Amino acid sequence: SVRLPESVTSIADEVFTSCSSLKEINWPSGVDNIGWHLFNGTALTEFTVPATVKLVESYAFMDCTQLEKVIFESRDTVVTGSQIFENTPLLTIYCWYDSSAQAATEFNMVPYVLFDAPADLPRYRIYTTVQGDGTLLAAPADSTGFEWVTVDVAAAPNSVLYDLYLFYYSYEEL
């Protein structure tokens, strides 16, 4: 665990890269940037991106294989570049609808929870992944049984909600 003093205002890129024993860190309110490769390969299990953070850069959480939860407190935090969440198999992101964080999770194919999802966003309980024909087997989120339905991915391109969880999937246009 790392305890940074509140007086810290800047943290260089890659400072914690491959610190495989780093499981927990506090974030000083004066640091407004999570830099390139900052937590790459650490053992973090949870991280809250405070509202004071304005920018999260490429590869920031890449290879954090134990990371289960990242919470974005602000809709305005800009998440740039690619592979920010690559190889984070346990991760779920908590973020705001139509935010930069949401776009990054979709790009990195990471499940996420939206704090303010529109009521008309389609919700499904997913039982299998996308099939070769571009459909997936699912049941409506309000379903209590195991009645299977086929959902055409064109009806909800790029994303499907699992109760409150949004999973990104890729597919080919038919």
Image (cartoon, helix red, strand yellow):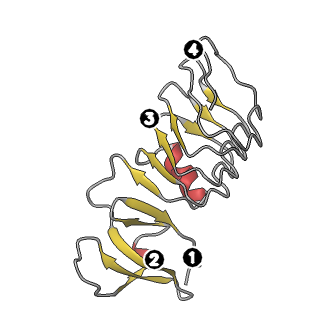
For marks 3 and 1, the one nearer the N-term is: 3
Q: Nearer the viewer, mark 2 or mark 3?
A: 3
Instruction: Report the residue marked by disc 1.
Output: 171
Q: Earlier in the sequence, mark 1 or mark 2?
A: 2
Q: Tag 1: residue type?
A: Tyr
Residue for point 60% across, 32% down: 55
* CA separation in Å, label 1 and label 4: 46 Å
Gap in angstroms between the C-alphas marked 2 and 3: 30 Å
Numbered disc 4: secondary structure: loop
In the picture, measured across the screen, residue 49 lies left or right of residue 7, that is left
Q: Position of residue 114 (x, y in %)?
A: 39, 50
Find the distance from the CA under tag 4 to the CA under tag 2. 47 Å
Cα gap from disc 1 to disc 2, whole angstroms? 8 Å
Q: Residue at 37% x, 66% y: name it.
A: 162
Q: Nearer the viewer, mark 4 or mark 2?
A: 4
Front position among marks 1 and 4: 4
Left or right of 65? Residue 128 is left
Residue 106, image quadrant = bottom right
Residue 37: quadrant of the picture: top right
In the image shown, does 27 or 23 lie closer to the viewer? Answer: 23
* In contact (CB < 8 Å): disc 4 and disc 3: no
